[in-house]
Structures are given as C-alpha cells and as structure tokens.
Image (cartoon, rainbow, N blue to C red):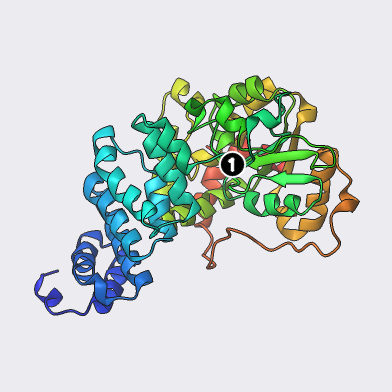
Amino acid sequence: MAAEPLIGSEPAEALSRARQLLGEGKGAEARLWLQAACADAQALPAEQAAGAWCLLGLQQREQGKEGPAGHSFLRALHHQGDCEQALWALDFHRFTPELLAELLPGLDALVSQGQCRHPRALEVLADWHHQVGDRARAERFFRPLAGDPSDDPAGERRPEALVIGAPKCGTTSLMAYLGAHPQVWTQPRKELHFFDNRWHWGPQWYAEQFPPRRPGGPRVRMEGTPDYLQHRVIAERVRQTLPDVRLIVVLREPVERALSWYHHQRRWGGLMGSAETVIARELEEINALPAAERRSLGWRAPNCLAGSLYDEQLQSWRQHFAKGKLLFLHFEDLRRNPGQTTRRALAFLGLDPEELPAQTRFPVLNGTPEPYPPLDSGLAQLCRQTLLAGAHELWGHL
C-alpha cells in the first residue's frame, strides 16, 4: 500500500485500519497505519493510545526489533498505566542485558512516579532489577507479603499445595474457588514462577511469600503456576524444596487447549497467522525434531501443541512424586460442575468440602472474551492421531 493515504489520517481511523489489516494478515501495511496512529496518539483516548503502541510493539517484536518494541510497550504504559497487554509483553520477553539496562529506567520512573502501580508492573520491575544485580531494589518492588521470617522459627513458611498446570485449563478459576474455603490461603499473585523463572532468587524469598503457620489459621497455603508442568527440571526442584507438597493438575482435551492457547497468544502475545497455519507449522516442526530434543522439549514457541504434550510432561512429575500426591482433574468437569470439582480438590487437600461456604460463586476467570471457531477438523484429527496421540489417550483415561 502506498503511504499517501496515511497523510492527514485521523489517529482513530489509522488505528482502525491497522487492526483490519492485521486481521487480514497484512503486517507490513498495518505497521504504516500503526505508526500514523502512534504519531498522534495523544489525540486518542488513553486505552486506544495504549492499544496502538502495544500493537506497534508486537509488530516490531515480530520483526526482531527488540529495542523499539520494548520502548513501544513503555509508551503504552505512559498512556495507560495498567495496560495489561504491555505489561504482559514486558514480563514474558527475555531482553538482552544491554537492552534491559536501557529500558529499566523508563519503567522505574513510571512506577516510582505513580503512573503505573499494577502488581504485574512491580513484578517486572523486581525481575529486571534482580537481573542487573540490584537485589535490594528488586526486593523493594517484590516485598514479602506475609511478614517477618523470624515469626516462623520452625521454618514452616512453605505451601502445602501447588496447582502446576496446565495453562488455559481453568487454573485461575480453580484457585479462586479453593480460596473461598476458610482453611485455604491462596497466594494473591497466584503465579509466583519461583521454580521456573525465579529459582535463582532462592528458597528464602519463596518462603517469604507465604504466611507462617498459626493456631487457628489456614491449614493449606498454596500458589498456582501452570507453567510448572511443562519444564522437566521443575519436578526435581519442587521435590527438593517441598517434599510433602500435594500437586493439582488440570488437563483439557489437548487440541482444545492448543487452540485456546493460540487465541490467548494472539490476544496478548501478538501471534500472527491463522490457527490452522500456526498449528500446522508447529506440528511439522516438532515432528521433525530428533528424539533426544523431543524428550527435553520444554516450553517451545508458539507452544500451542508443545504445551499439550501431557504424557511427556508428566513423566518427571511421576518419577519424583508418589501417585497419592497428584490429583488430576478434567477442565471439562470444572467447567460443567465447578462446585463438585472444587469439593473433590478440597478433599484431596485433606479438608472438609462441606466447609466451603454455601454462597460460594463459581465465575469463569481469565477466559477467552469472545467465542472462536473450532480448528479445521482434518488438522485436529491429524494432531490427535500423531503428535498428541499419547496426550489424548492420557486425558481420556484420567
């Protein structure tokens, strides 16, 4: 598309046109319109201005322009301090140390000046300070939530239970339902990412994220990081740190989980291309990997199919934990009958399900905001018969 139509375009018109072009897969043309929208973003409402900068940042990241992308996400936060898409992008992108040092002052200023006080912003800032070696400043933004460790000389500030997976399987909802029980304390941040992203912060930091055991206090303290399931090294780390912990795993029909993750990444991570294109390409790439690499796959972008390889992911967990320490739940059961499924989980945790307040509500949390079409039936069947055959069988026989 020629650049002339951009001249004199209203920013709202430019943003609308960019979104349309992105939906058609025309990224190069969309970037021109996004640049036009961002050039006059002050004329847009805050949410739209932040959205324009986020979309531009995602496009820049798609091109491998990490520096411009990082700055675009910060510009989004200038317009809307609680812009979750920008915070998500900054949180889950691994910037080089040099680029991190360049971006850190901008986010630091936004937080320190009160423009951005979203909890995820504090987590990102804490992680960034920790990565550049400033542990003291990192802890300033990621303070212990539960008081002084000296309150618990017996060293019992550790969770009794973890929800370890899988992503897009209802773990956010389940954690909220369990937290309604008077004997359950759930970590306010839900996902601490200690055993994957923050292992180097050390067990003392992890312990400080939980309250000490007190007479009459909650009997079960827990956090839920669904990414734990997929990383092979994490089971051993959890076993070393929490040998008596109980583990809850929620699994969804593997192809349905892959499709839900695709739409999640399209919404938050700027994933481009149709579901069929992305998933077919991932299927081909993973099938072409050597056997040794497949066994240690872990998290692999775009992680639609890789995240659904339950049979391979669970091998290390079953090696390190006895059968009685693992509870498997169906996402489909949680969706159809959340009360019954929650009570089953409470019983597994050694609690009386009847103590769950009668007025407890079971809303769907962190769900996809809009319905989406099913995956092409031929491709779905191919996934189930090949790469996801073991995962599908496991899910079907839980």
* Residue at 66% over, 44% down: 251
Mark 1 lies on residue = 226
Which one is nearer the viewer's eye here, 104 or 292? Answer: 104
* Residue at 9% over, 74% down: 4
Visible residue check, residue 136:
yes
**Image coords of residue 382 (percent x, y):** 52, 45
**Image coords of residue 247 (percent x, y):** 71, 34
Which one is nearer the viewer's eye here, 62 or 362? Answer: 362
**Rendered position, 52 above or below 305:** below
**Image coords of residue 101 (percent x, y):** 27, 38
Identify the image quadrant of residue 114.
bottom left
Which one is nearer the viewer's eye here, 95 or 265? Answer: 95
Residue type of the residue flagged with mark 1:
Pro
- Count of numbered circles in the view: 1
The answer to whether 22 appears left or right of 36 in the picture is right
**Rendered position, 277 above or below 237:** below
**Image coords of residue 26 (percent x, y):** 26, 62
Which one is nearer the viewer's eye here, 177 or 397? Answer: 177
Identify the image quadrant of residue 234.
top right
The answer to whether 37 appears left or right of 114 in the picture is left
Q: In which quarter of the image is the C terminus?
A: top right
Q: How crowded is mark 1: few (under 14 residues within 10 Å), some or many (20 or more)?
A: many
